[in-house]
Image (cartoon, rainbow, N blue to C red):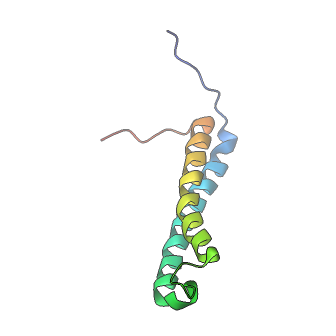
Amino acid sequence: MAAETVATNPNLIPLWHALRILRWLLYLALLAFGLYFVSDRPSHIDQFGQLMPSTELLIFGLGGAPVVVGLFEMMVRDWAGAPRKPPR
């Protein structure tokens, strides 16, 4: 079997770095919102003790967005031909 060759594009390296930064910013936003939620919980709970829809959307959206961005980051890294860290 012949190994597949993947065309590399070094012009995608800045996009890869931007996605890395965005992923970490999303994780920080999730942490910040979590701290805000803990500090002001009554404003996020309705009269039945359930989360408000906007709060639920933020919690699950900010939890899933970094994962999706991380998948795109790995895809762009492979397209750019950036080297992976060797396993230790």
| Relative vertical location of residue 72 with respect to residue 20 in this rendering, above or below | above
Residue in front for this viewpoint, 45 or 35: 45
> Furthest-top residue in view?
1
Relative to 64, 12 lies left or right: right
Looking at the image, which residue is at 50% across and 38% down?
83
Report which quarter residue 44 is drawn in: bottom right
Which residue shows up at 56% across the image and 56% down it?
20
Quarter of the image holding residue 46?
bottom right
Quadrant that contains the C terminus: top left
- Rendered image quadrant of residue 60: bottom right
In the rendered image, residue 26, in percent from the top left (x then y), is placed at: 57, 66
* Viewer-closest of 81 and 39: 39
In this view of the protein, which residue sits in the foreground, 69 or 15? 69
x then y, percent, for residue 1: 49, 9
As drawn, which residue projects farthest toward the left?
Answer: 88
Which residue occupies the foreground of this view, 47 or 5? 47
- When the figure is inspected, residue 11 is found, relative to residue 27, above or below; the finding is above
Q: Outermost residue toward the front? A: 48
Q: Residue at x 67, y 35 (%)?
A: 9
As displayed, is residue 28 above or below residue 36? above
Which residue is rendered at x = 58% and y = 52% of the image?
68
Number of numbered markers: 0
> Residue 75's spot in the image, x, y percent?
59, 40
